[in-house]
Amino acid sequence: MGSEHTIVGTLLVEYAEPLGANIKRMLLHAPQSFVDQALGVVAEAVRETALAGEPVAEQTVLRRLETRGTLTTAGGALALARLAGYAVSNELAELDAQELWQRYKATRTQSVLSDGAEAIGEFPNRAELIADGVTRTLAELNRDTEARTLT
């Protein structure tokens, strides 16, 4: 079973470009792509740190969380430090990310379709507009992430 802890722990200890496709997808959709809200917030800070051109490491991510006022949501400095213990090789983290991405994608697809059907039921005269929104949301979820970089 894939572990969100291993993905985030590995990124904090051994962040290396190019990222695996599934790790990249998890980061680009963070924090929503993480079941554990605290880990999603840390992953979002990892992404923002990388996009800012700063080295991704425990201290730089900690500073970003402090600056954003989300360190408490992320579990605090001690929780961030403990994530290093979950670090594995980038290859193993990518395997975990593949499983977790597929799970997130299936859950998100089901949610989008369900919400769209409910909205059409409530507003049948706006069905075409709602369907377009559903289509765009699913296309974003399924689009190739290689065009978006984290460097």
Image (cartoon, rainbow, N blue to C red):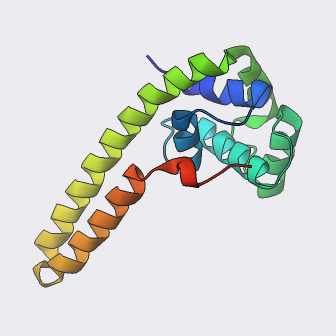
Q: Residue at x 25, y 60 (%)?
A: 115
- Whether residue 148 is visible, yes or no, is yes
Work out whether 64 lies above or below 78: below
**In-front residue for pair 116/49:** 49
Q: Please identify the residue farthest to the bottom as the structure is shown.
A: 125
Locate residue 100 relative to residue 58 in the image: left or right: left
Instruction: From the top left corner, tell me how far across and down residue 116 is, in percent.
Output: 22, 64
> Which percent across, then down, holds residue 106?
31, 40
Q: Position of residue 58 (x, y in %)?
A: 83, 33
Q: Is residue 31 visible?
A: no
Query: Where in the figure is residue 45, as x and y percent of width and height?
Result: 72, 47
Q: Quarter-wise, where is residue 134 in the image? A: bottom left
- Residue 34 vertical position relative to residue 121 in the rendered view, above or below: above
Q: Quadrant of residue 46?
A: top right
Residue at 51% over, 38% down: 34
Quadrant holding the N terminus:
top left
Identity of the residue drawn at 22% across and 56% down: 113
